[in-house]
Protein backbone atom coordinates (compact mmCIF):
# COMPACT_ATOMS: atom_id res chain seq x y z
CA UNK A 1 0.00 0.00 0.00
CA UNK A 2 2.66 2.52 1.02
CA UNK A 3 4.73 1.50 -2.00
CA UNK A 4 1.76 2.30 -4.27
CA UNK A 5 1.38 5.74 -2.71
CA UNK A 6 5.08 6.53 -3.08
CA UNK A 7 5.07 5.29 -6.68
CA UNK A 8 2.11 7.52 -7.48
CA UNK A 9 3.86 10.53 -5.91
CA UNK A 10 7.03 9.88 -7.88
CA UNK A 11 5.10 9.69 -11.14
CA UNK A 12 3.66 13.18 -10.80
CA UNK A 13 6.69 14.86 -9.19
CA UNK A 14 8.82 17.27 -11.19
CA UNK A 15 12.62 16.90 -11.08
CA UNK A 16 14.38 20.22 -11.66
CA UNK A 17 18.15 20.20 -11.93
CA UNK A 18 19.18 23.72 -10.97
CA UNK A 19 22.96 23.40 -11.39
CA UNK A 20 25.45 20.66 -12.14
CA UNK A 21 29.18 20.45 -12.72
CA UNK A 22 32.25 18.28 -12.30
CA UNK A 23 35.49 19.13 -10.52
CA UNK A 24 39.01 17.83 -10.04
CA UNK A 25 40.20 19.10 -6.65
CA UNK A 26 43.23 18.66 -4.44
CA UNK A 27 41.64 20.67 -1.66
CA UNK A 28 38.12 21.07 -0.29
CA UNK A 29 36.97 22.68 2.92
CA UNK A 30 33.25 23.41 3.15
CA UNK A 31 32.28 23.85 6.80
CA UNK A 32 28.85 24.37 8.38
CA UNK A 33 27.27 24.30 4.94
CA UNK A 34 23.48 24.41 4.61
CA UNK A 35 21.39 24.37 1.44
CA UNK A 36 18.16 26.23 2.06
CA UNK A 37 15.98 25.39 -0.92
CA UNK A 38 17.41 22.42 -2.79
CA UNK A 39 19.08 19.04 -2.49
CA UNK A 40 22.67 18.29 -3.39
CA UNK A 41 23.82 15.02 -4.81
CA UNK A 42 27.54 14.37 -5.31
CA UNK A 43 29.19 11.38 -6.94
CA UNK A 44 32.83 10.58 -6.13
CA UNK A 45 34.42 9.30 -9.33
CA UNK A 46 38.05 9.14 -8.14
CA UNK A 47 40.07 10.00 -5.03
CA UNK A 48 38.54 10.55 -1.61
CA UNK A 49 36.97 13.12 0.69
CA UNK A 50 35.07 13.28 3.98
CA UNK A 51 31.51 14.17 4.90
CA UNK A 52 30.58 15.15 8.44
CA UNK A 53 26.93 15.21 9.50
CA UNK A 54 26.33 15.94 13.18
CA UNK A 55 29.05 13.93 14.96
CA UNK A 56 29.44 11.23 12.31
CA UNK A 57 32.26 11.32 9.73
CA UNK A 58 31.83 9.37 6.50
CA UNK A 59 34.72 8.35 4.23
CA UNK A 60 33.87 9.13 0.62
CA UNK A 61 35.53 6.77 -1.83
CA UNK A 62 35.13 6.21 -5.60
CA UNK A 63 31.65 4.96 -6.44
CA UNK A 64 30.03 6.73 -3.48
CA UNK A 65 27.00 9.00 -3.81
CA UNK A 66 26.34 11.74 -1.25
CA UNK A 67 22.77 12.92 -0.76
CA UNK A 68 22.28 16.13 1.25
CA UNK A 69 18.72 17.36 1.90
CA UNK A 70 17.83 21.02 2.47
CA UNK A 71 18.50 22.49 5.93
CA UNK A 72 21.08 19.84 6.91
CA UNK A 73 24.25 21.36 8.35
CA UNK A 74 27.27 19.44 7.09
CA UNK A 75 30.99 19.64 6.38
CA UNK A 76 32.54 18.35 3.19
CA UNK A 77 36.33 18.34 3.11
CA UNK A 78 39.56 16.61 2.13
CA UNK A 79 42.29 15.56 4.52
CA UNK A 80 44.83 14.56 1.86
CA UNK A 81 46.33 16.23 -1.20
CA UNK A 82 45.38 13.49 -3.65
CA UNK A 83 43.19 14.63 -6.53
CA UNK A 84 39.50 13.92 -6.12
CA UNK A 85 37.15 13.97 -9.10
CA UNK A 86 33.48 14.44 -8.35
CA UNK A 87 30.22 15.38 -10.06
CA UNK A 88 27.50 17.33 -8.27
CA UNK A 89 23.92 18.46 -8.82
CA UNK A 90 21.62 20.89 -7.04
CA UNK A 91 18.00 19.93 -7.61
CA UNK A 92 14.42 19.92 -6.39
CA UNK A 93 11.84 17.14 -6.74
CA UNK A 94 8.39 18.51 -5.98
CA UNK A 95 4.74 17.98 -6.79
CA UNK A 96 3.27 21.18 -8.23
CA UNK A 97 6.29 23.07 -6.82
CA UNK A 98 4.80 22.61 -3.34
CA UNK A 99 5.19 19.10 -1.94
CA UNK A 100 8.73 17.76 -1.57
CA UNK A 101 8.65 14.06 -2.48
CA UNK A 102 12.09 12.93 -1.31
CA UNK A 103 11.50 12.83 2.48
CA UNK A 104 9.10 9.93 1.84
CA UNK A 105 11.99 7.85 0.47
CA UNK A 106 14.30 7.99 3.52
CA UNK A 107 17.44 8.21 1.38
CA UNK A 108 20.68 7.82 3.38
CA UNK A 109 23.33 10.57 3.33
CA UNK A 110 25.82 8.31 1.58
CA UNK A 111 25.59 5.06 -0.29
CA UNK A 112 28.05 3.08 -2.40
CA UNK A 113 26.83 2.19 -5.87
CA UNK A 114 26.80 -1.44 -6.92
CA UNK A 115 27.15 -0.56 -10.60
CA UNK A 116 28.96 2.77 -10.78
CA UNK A 117 29.81 2.30 -14.49
CA UNK A 118 26.12 2.26 -15.44
CA UNK A 119 25.44 5.22 -13.12
CA UNK A 120 28.19 7.23 -14.87
CA UNK A 121 26.74 6.39 -18.30
CA UNK A 122 23.23 7.48 -17.31
CA UNK A 123 24.38 10.68 -15.56
CA UNK A 124 26.67 11.65 -18.46
CA UNK A 125 23.76 11.26 -20.86
CA UNK A 126 21.48 13.31 -18.61
CA UNK A 127 24.06 16.10 -18.28
CA UNK A 128 24.56 16.23 -22.07
CA UNK A 129 20.78 16.39 -22.57
CA UNK A 130 20.37 19.22 -20.05
CA UNK A 131 23.30 21.17 -21.48
CA UNK A 132 21.83 20.85 -24.99
CA UNK A 133 18.38 22.02 -23.84
CA UNK A 134 19.86 25.07 -22.09
CA UNK A 135 21.44 26.23 -25.35
CA UNK A 136 17.96 26.63 -26.82
CA UNK A 137 16.58 28.80 -23.97
Image (spheres, rainbow, N blue to C red):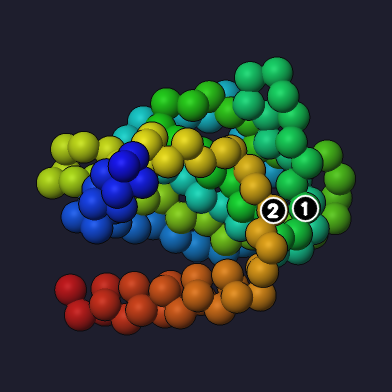
Asked if the residue under mark 1 is in contact with the one under mark 2, i.e. CB atoms within 8 Å, the reply is yes
Quote the CA–CA distance across marks 2 and 1: 8 Å
Left or right of residue 5, residue 119 in this image: right
Q: Residues within 10 Å of mark 2 (few under 14, many from 20)?
A: some
> Which residue is rendered at x = 39% and y = 57% of the image?
19
Rendered location of residue 67, percent (x, y): 53, 44
Residue 110 in view (yes/no): yes
Q: Closer to the camera, 63 or 84?
A: 63
Q: Residues within 10 Å of mark 1 (few under 14, many from 20)?
A: some
Q: Residue furthest top?
A: 55
Q: Quadrant of the C terminus?
A: bottom left
* Above or below for 119 versus 80: below
> Which residue is rendered at x = 69% and y = 53% of the image?
112
Q: Quadrant of the N terminus?
A: top left
Residue 86's disc number = none
> Which residue is rendered at x = 59% and y = 46% of the image?
66
Rendered location of residue 12, percent (x, y): 19, 55
Residue 17 quadrant: bottom left
Residue ID for mark 1: 61
> Which residue is rendered at x = 38% and y = 35% of the image?
103
Amino acid sequence: MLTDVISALLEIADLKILKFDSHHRNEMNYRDRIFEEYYMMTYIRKGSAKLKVQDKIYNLLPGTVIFIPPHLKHDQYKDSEEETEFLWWHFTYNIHQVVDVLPFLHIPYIYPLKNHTRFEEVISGLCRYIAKRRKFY
